[in-house]
Image (tube, rainbow, N blue to C red):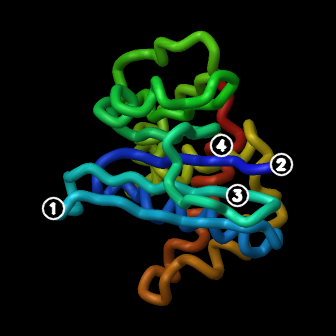
Amino acid sequence: MAQTGILFAGFGGQGILFSGKFLAYEGLISDKQVSWLPSYGPEMRGGTASCSVVFSDEVIGSPIVEKPDILVVMNLPSLDKYESAVVPGGKIFYDCSLIDRKVNRTDVQAFAVPATKMAADNGMPTLANMILVGKMIKETGLISTEHVEKIIDKIVSARHQDLKELNAKAIKMGYDYEA
């Protein structure tokens, strides 16, 4: 892997920045060069949020992902905005519970996951983001499944320790999801 750019996008409050942080931590424990650049509107919850993550074997020149290799989106405005930016041959993961259209491009791989519905049906309504992360892990191999628990232990705050097990469950649900 020379360099891989990943862009997470959606509304504030959907766990976009947490998803990016989760992925960035994998880069740290795998001894890669990594950058994590969150971006969100001033209203935070309900406003737009995105997060750029870059993995590289070499020094990273810019933390901004303008042409993502991997796009993970949780709302229609984000799919509309970023779909055309994905590199040919890239991968797009989207929450088809909230996005009522398919990916238009034929030169990328698209993975529709009903993440919000799955999360709600399983009593974890705030973890749709981690279901998408689980699917991304399976389809890209960017994260070793052996590292998932270690990453969760590191990034789940002390205040939310009760969510560690649910985060792991959500990732596994996404990993195991087949359309």
Q: Is residue 31 left or right of residue 169?
A: right
Type of amino acid at the residue the image marks with label 4:
Met
Separation of residues labelled 3 and 2 (CA atoms): 8 Å
Between 15 and 28, the one nearer to me in the picture: 28
Whether residue 166 is visible, yes or no, is: no
Identify the residue position indicated by label 1 in the image: 43
Q: Secondary structure at mark 3?
A: strand
The disc, 3 or 2, on the residue closer to the chain's N-terminal end is 2
Whether residue 161 is visible, yes or no, is: yes
> Where residue 73 sits: x, y (%)?
44, 39
The disc, 1 or 2, on the residue closer to the chain's N-terminal end is 2
- Image label count: 4
**Quarter the C terminus occupies:** top right
Q: Secondary structure at mark 1?
A: loop
Locate residue 87: give its quadrant: top right
Label placed on residue 1: 2
- Tell me the crowding category of disc 2: few under 14, some 14 to 19, or many 20 or more residues within 10 angstroms, Cα based: few
Identify the residue position indicated by label 4 in the image: 136
Type of amino acid at the residue the image marks with label 3:
Phe
Identify the residue position indicated by label 3 in the image: 55
Foreground disc of the pair 1, 2: 2
Q: Is residue 73 left or right of residue 40?
A: right
Residue visible at 63% across and 14% down in the picture:
107
Type of amino acid at the residue the image marks with label 2:
Met
